[in-house]
Image (tube, helix red, strand yellow):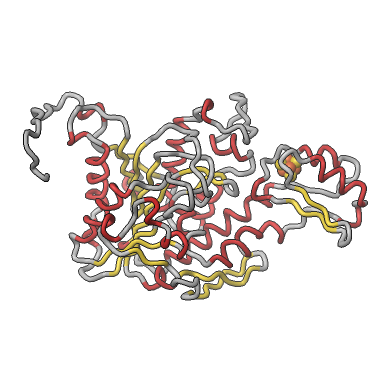
Amino acid sequence: MSSQRAKVYFGSVKQGNRAKFASFAAKVDEIVKKLDLSTIQKKDKVAIKMHLGYEDNYQTIPVFFVRRVVEAVKKTGAFPFITDNPTSVYNAVNRGYTSETCGCPLIPFDGVKDKYLYKVNIDFKGVEFLEMGGVLHDSDALIDLSHAKGHNTCGYGGAIKNLAIGAFSAQSRWNKYHTIWQSIPYWNPDKCTPEHAKKLVESCPEHLITYKNDEHRLNVEFDMCNQCMKCIEVDKGAGCLEIKQEHFSAFQEMMAIGTSKVLENIPKEKRFFINFAIEIIPYCDCWPFAQPCIVNDIGVLGSRDIVAIEKATLDLIAKEGLNESMIPLYFRPNLDRKVNLHPFQRIHGPMKNPYIVVDYAEKLGLGTKDYELVEVLSPASTVSMKAPTHVTEIEPTFF
Ligand code: SF4
C-alpha cells in the first residue's frame, strides 16, 4: 500500500544549522535533485510555467530560486524557457526576471498578441472549448513552478491553477472560466420585483449585486462573494435568489479539466511540480499590488504528482493556520475556531473549499491524494551536524 503513495519532497524555511548545507537554497537544490530530471531528454524544449506577476505586486517566486531550477534543467542537455501570458512576460523585468538573471529565455505562451492558440474541446456546462497557449502545447517537458497563495474565486492558487487558468488565452480565462457560474441559475426574474431587487442590491456588504432596471436583470459577482448569506436573509419569503455550492465548485471542476488538457500533451515522466509556499498572500499574483502575508512562510515542495503536491501544500497551510494580525481590513474572515475550515475558507468563504479542485483532479486521473511527505534537510536532522568554519573574505574572490 505504502509503495503506491506519491512522494512529496518538502524543505522547510525553518533551519537547524548555521550553515549553507542546511539553508533554504540547499533544500531547493535537494528537492530538484530528488525529482530526478534525468527523464528529460537532451534537446527537449522544457517549459517552466510560472506566474510572473503583475503591476505593483512583487510577491512572486524569487529569481534567485528560478535560476537554480533553470540551471538544473540545463544540466540535462535540454533547452529550458520560462513562460507565462504575454503581459506578464513583457513586464517580468519589473520583478527581476530577464533571460540574463533567469539563465534562459522568457517566452509568452501564446505569442505576443494572445493568438498562437490550440483549441481543446471540453464540453463543460455549455463551454465547448478552451484556447490553450501554443508554446505550452508544443513543449516536450514541463516544470510547473508555482507560488502557493490564496485565490478569490477558488480559495487557493498553486500548481493546478498555474496550468488551469495560467495556460489559456485571456478570452478563455475571463469569458469562460470566470463566468462559468452563469451557467447555473441563481436568480428567478419572475419571482422578483424591481423593488425587491433593489433590496437585494443593498443587502450585500461587498457590493457584489447589481440590478439593471431597464432589462430587469440581476447580477451577482460570485468571484468575490464570501457567502455571508446576507442577501439570502433579505430574500426570505420571496425565494428568488440562490447562492449554492455548485456556483463555486463549477470553477474548480473546470480548473481540473483545463489542467488535464495541458498535461495530456506532456509525457508523464516529463512532468515536474514545484510549489513555493512562501509569501502566502490572500489573492492571486495577478492582483496589481503587494499584499500582507496571511500565513507564515512554510517552505518548498516538489513532486511528480500534481494532485499529491496540491494536497500536501494545502495540508501544510492548514497546519500553519492564519496569521490573524496580518489579515487586511477589507476581509470579513470567519475566525471561529469551533468551525472547521481551511485558512483560505476562513478568508474567502466556506464554499470556496480549496480541496474541491484536488478531488476533481484525482477523479480525472491526474494523480493521487495519498501522499508521503519526505522532508529534506529537516532542522532536526541538521542541528547536530558539524558546521564548516566560517571564513571571512579578506579580498574579493568573486565566488
Ligand atoms: S452571500 Fe455573497 S452576494 Fe450575498 S451578500 Fe454575501 S457577499 Fe454579497
Instruction: Indicate left or right for 128 with 208 as reference.
Output: left
Taking depth in this image into account, of 201 and 311 the one nearest to the observer is: 201
* Horizontal and vertical percent position of residue 295: 47, 33
- Above or below, comparing residue 152 to residue 76 in the picture: above
* Residue at 6% from the left image edge and 33% from the top image edge: 394
Residue most toward the front? 395
Quadrant location, ligand no. 1: top right
Could you tell me residue 363's position as x and y percent? 51, 56
Q: Is residue 268 above or below residue 313?
A: below
397 or 131, which is in the foreground? 397
Q: Residue 326, percent across and down?
A: 51, 29
Image quadrant holding the C terminus, namely: top left
Q: Is residue 236 left or right of residue 361?
A: right
- The vertical placement of 215 against 395, above or below, is below
At 35% from the left and 70% from the top, the residue drawn is 139
> Which residue is found at the position 65% from the left and 33% from the top?
332
For the image, the number of numbered tags is 0
Residue 380: where, in percent of width, then height?
25, 26
Which of the 4 quarters of the picture holds residue 185?
bottom right
Is residue 311 shown above or below 176?
above
Q: Quadrant of the N terminus?
A: top left
Quarter of image, res 297 = top left
Q: Quadrant of residue 138?
A: bottom left
Q: Residue at x 82, y 37 (%)?
A: 233
